[in-house]
Amino acid sequence: MRLATWLIVVLTLLTGPCFAQQKKAAAKPSTAAAANTALIDINSASEQELKQLPGIGDAYAAKIVQNRPYRAKNELVQKKILPAATYDKIRDRIIARQAGAGDYIALLAYIERTPETNEALEAIRLRLRDLRHVATTLGYGPRFQHSTGQEHKGGSNTGVFLQFVATDTVDVPIPDEPYTFSVLKQAQALGDLQSLEAHDRRVIRIDLGTGIADGLGEVLQALEAATVA
């Protein structure tokens, strides 16, 4: 697992529109993903910065600024801010930054709760809070499904969700059932992810594999290196 990979995951979570992706510990960042940090944020860029984009002059730059905020960059076309042909020229160079005022970030941990993992997750939560200046929560699945999990899907679409899963090194069979407790837990995590997606929530999934402590440590390192405002 490389620090750069986790940094891209974190920045994607903090800047992307509604989507769901799964990042495996061994995944390597693509060239396109690595360019995310250089994208122009249509929710915060000045008119001068917007005019650096091809096809964006004074009128379009002013129109983009006047019609903020944007939940996703394709709203530039949906709201008839830009014609599709102009949008196609800039779509790979812009982003609609999320997790702003009024939003919250929720850490959904489908991993074993230990003093060490809880300390690491709390450090991640606090760093996200300080980076984005938004409320943050931490819950262990599937337990939180009976409390905050109801708000995640049934409440307003203001949550940004970071789901952590891992490979269990120890498993226990369920009497009279063809599956184990590990399979049941993974199914619950997958169901939660799919439900969030179905409700158009902003969610990303990180698979820590068997190295939970190392994975969480690298996520925290990536956050500490991030300078997202």
Image: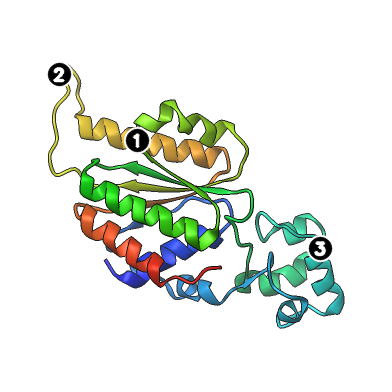
**Picture coordinates of residue 97, whole percent (x, y):** 61, 62
Residue wearing tag 3? 81
Mark 1 and mark 2: span between their CA atoms?
A: 22 Å
Q: In which quadrant is the N terminus drawn?
A: bottom left
Left or right, 106 with reference to 120: right
Label 3 to label 1: alpha-carbon separation? 41 Å
Q: To which residue does mark 2 refer?
A: 175
**Residue 195 image label:** none
Provide the residue designation for mark 1.
141
Mark nearer the N terminus (3 vs 2): 3
Residue at 43 percent across and 41 percent down: it is: 193
Q: Is residue 82 visible to the viewer in this orientation of the structure?
A: no
The 10 Å Cα crowd at callout 3, few under 14, some 14 to 19, many 20 or more, is some
Residue found at x 60% / y 45%: 158
Amino acid carrying mark 1 in the image: Gly
**Residue 8 percent location from the top left of the image:** 43, 67
**Relative vertical location of residue 148 with respect to residue 23 in this rendering, above or below:** above
Is residue 76 in sight in this rendering?
yes
Q: Please tell me whether mark 2 sits on a helix, a strand or a loop.
A: loop
Q: Quadrant of residue 189?
A: top left
Secondary element at image label 3: loop
The residue under label 2 is which amino acid type?
Pro
* Alpha-carbon span between mark 3 and mark 2: 59 Å
